[in-house]
Amino acid sequence: MNNIQQPLKICLKCYEKLFLRCININVENSKRGPVPTVSFVGDRARLYPSIYCWGYIGTGALGVFDFVNKKPDPKHTDASQQTRLRRSIPYRHPFSYEHQIKINRIACGNGFTLFSSNTLKYDKLWGCGLNTDSQLTFFKDRHHPKGFGDYVIVPKIIHLPIKHPRSTRITQIAAGRAHSIVLTDNSGRSNKQIGI
């Protein structure tokens, strides 16, 4: 019995030393005061709202070129190719922070997406995705036999026919199955009808 008690006493002494050492460290740290926080951000750094996207990527509605540009793997079956066309995990969209544009409104239609900014610059509206009915706008494409592109993979600027683009802001955007609507704060009729 004496042989068992001896190692047990040694273990308890080691435990007491470790425990007391931990208590002393905590007491010393509390006497030093708060730890300073250091931030490594530049003088001109700004925060931009982040856009996260997920879903079906086959039409380019998410607007991320790398999703659509991937070549299909011949080793995979057709079922795995269909899961490759769906993004189930949210992905931070690079459009707003790469171009330093503050996107404040997004509208989604059937296979396409509209982005708008509340800026007074000329570029106020972007679109990507399915464009079979010109729901984004008429984009010329040399390689298409009809002259327009059916799929817009990355967000492209949509030029609005506004008389005074420097003084007009987009107040609301909406999208349906094959159409888009943009509401501006002026450039309409004097009786407040919708129209440009």
Image: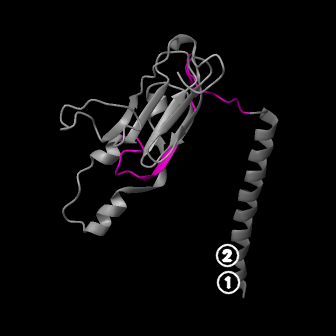
Residue for point 60% across, 18% down: 189
Q: Residue 82 lies in what quarter of the image? A: bottom left
Can you say whether 114 is above or below 55 in the image?
above
Q: Amino acid at mark 1?
A: Asn
- Which one is nearer the viewer's eye here, 147 or 5? 147
- Which one is nearer the viewer's eye here, 121 or 30? 121
> Position of 73 compared to 115: left or right?
left
- Which one is nearer the viewer's eye here, 23 or 11? 23
- Which one is nearer the viewer's eye here, 155 or 90? 155
> Position of 34 compared to 65: left or right?
right
Can you say whether 8 is above or below 143 in the image?
below
Which class describes the residues within 10 Å of circle 1: few (<14), some (14-19), or many (20+)?
Answer: few
Q: Secondary structure at mark 1?
A: helix
Residue 133 visible in the displayed image: yes
Can you say whether 43 is above or below 32 in the image?
above
Tag shown at residue 115: none
Can you say whether 22 is above or below 126 in the image?
below
Residue 17 is a magenta residue? no
Judging by the rendered image, the residue that carries numbered circle 1 is 3
Residue 50 visible in the displayed image: no
Judging by the rendered image, the residue that carries numbered circle 2 is 7
The answer to whether marks 2 and 1 mark residues whose Cβ atoms lie closer than 8 Å is yes
Instruction: Write down the region rendered in magenta.
Output: 35-64
Q: Amino acid at mark 2?
A: Pro
Q: Residue 195 lies in what quarter of the image? A: top right
Residue 39 is a magenta residue? yes
Give the position of the N terminus as an image quadrant. Answer: bottom right
